[in-house]
Amino acid sequence: MLLPRLSFLFLSLICWQVAPDTGEECHEFTDLNIHNSIVGTGLKVQLLLFTKDNLDCAEDLNQEKPLNSSYLKVSRKTVFIVHGYRPTGSPPVWLKDIVQHLLLVQDMNVVLVDWNRGATTLIYHTAAKNTRKVADILKNNIDKMLNEGASLENIYMIGVSLGAHIAGFVGHMYNGQLGRITGLDPAGPLFKGNPPDERLDPSDAQFVDVIHSDTDALGYKEALGHIDFYPNGGTDQPGCPQTIFSGSQYFKCDHQRSVFLYVSSLKDTCNVTTYPCDSYRDYRNGKCFSCEDFLPLTCPVLGYYADNWKDHLVLKNPAVTKAYFDTGTKEPYCIAHYFLDIITWNKSTRRGYITIKLMTKDGNTTESKINHETATFEQYSQVSLLARFDQDFEKVSRISLTFSTGSIIGPKYKIRVLRMRLRSLADPEKLQLCRYDLVLLENIETVFKPIPCQNMQM
């Protein structure tokens, strides 16, 4: 199944650049530059339609004329992709990926909403003001589709930054009857604190899911959907530059990560599992990894398939669901979650951090530094620490543990481990690994061979 899909994608990417000689006019996303941004651009919207029948040649659904398309089938799901503010005028780097992979997932209409003329300006306020006008144009086009037999339930809008609020405005005009809206790091500036009818809101569609990846800068911090996802707490994203010396990536990397996470969810790589929780701190402290209270009995996944969570909304209808998770530094972003359970028999309480490393026979290693908060080890009390690995090994031949108090000066301590246990969160049936009677000297790596837990008794 995977090979045909990869072949289809490869050919599609080639066709995007080289259209066959069909005699049709192929429309492209507006490509502007910094000069356009300086002088400003008047609003002009193109609606570029892609389907599996015209992957290589976008058709412009001219909103000024009656609906007349060679490829649009209103009986199919229609996805509108709405970009955001474009300070330099260049097309978003993720356009090809999101269109192509959506069409790999399902036979649908994908409409790229190109409002680059109107979004390209040095004055952010001007672009934000244009969002209402873009929403009106989209409603006009959707009305034509409805007249041809389309249903609001089959309309799905994906909005990026300012585009998320545009989607919300459209949904509000249809009294929340759109099938779904996905907000990808909705813009924060000029929208924070606005009432629901002046921003994206859960009432704008039957299902609204939001990914917040830059809540401390360009994004919106508060919940805006039926379920709001906060990768890495919603602020600094792994792999993004930490200093201004990295240039423009310093400003946009966190903001764009929401889009790349969504695109990754369309691919046959891995599903990013998320965990409903009251706070990122509680998630990191391992307090939110049971989804047994939810129906269906599963944790929500990120991205395209997040709408499976709608079944839970019908049955429980919570006011707000916030879901937290961590990611790797690059695609496919998935990480493996494990619990490291430690029981100590020190008479005195010890506080510190644990680093765990997993090794295979062929020399591969993966490491997790569990250092977000000091752990407290008390005699005969189990401490469960959340360990996050960028690789998930089928077989682990060696494990190492390192204990540290984080102090550079002063006495060195040790903890006496009565039992350690490593258990997978994603796969509770996976073999649990144990070891008994260890002494961890501070800042000294202790390497040992784990033993299947069921083969040993306390």
Image (cartoon, rainbow, N blue to C red):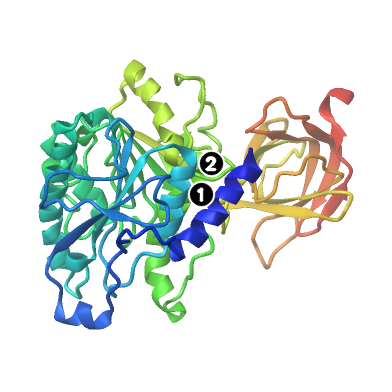
- Residue 404: horizontal and vertical position, in percent? 70, 56
- Residue 234: horizontal and vertical position, in percent? 40, 51
- Whether residues under marks 2 and 1 lie with C-beta atoms below 8 angstroms apart, the answer is yes
| Nearer the observer, 38 or 146 | 146
Give the left or right position of residue 249, taking residue 156 as reference: right
Residue on which the image places disc 1: 264
Q: Is residue 242 above or below residue 268?
A: below
Task: Answer yes or no: is residue 269 visible.
Answer: no
Q: Is residue 225 above or below residue 24?
A: above
Task: Answer yes or no: is residue 118 visible.
Answer: yes
Q: Quadrant of the N terminus?
A: top right
Q: Quadrant of the C terminus?
A: top right
Question: Label for residue 272?
Answer: 2
Q: Amino acid at mark 1?
A: Ser
Q: Amino acid at mark 2?
A: Val
Task: Residue at 27% x, 59% y: name it.
Answer: 84
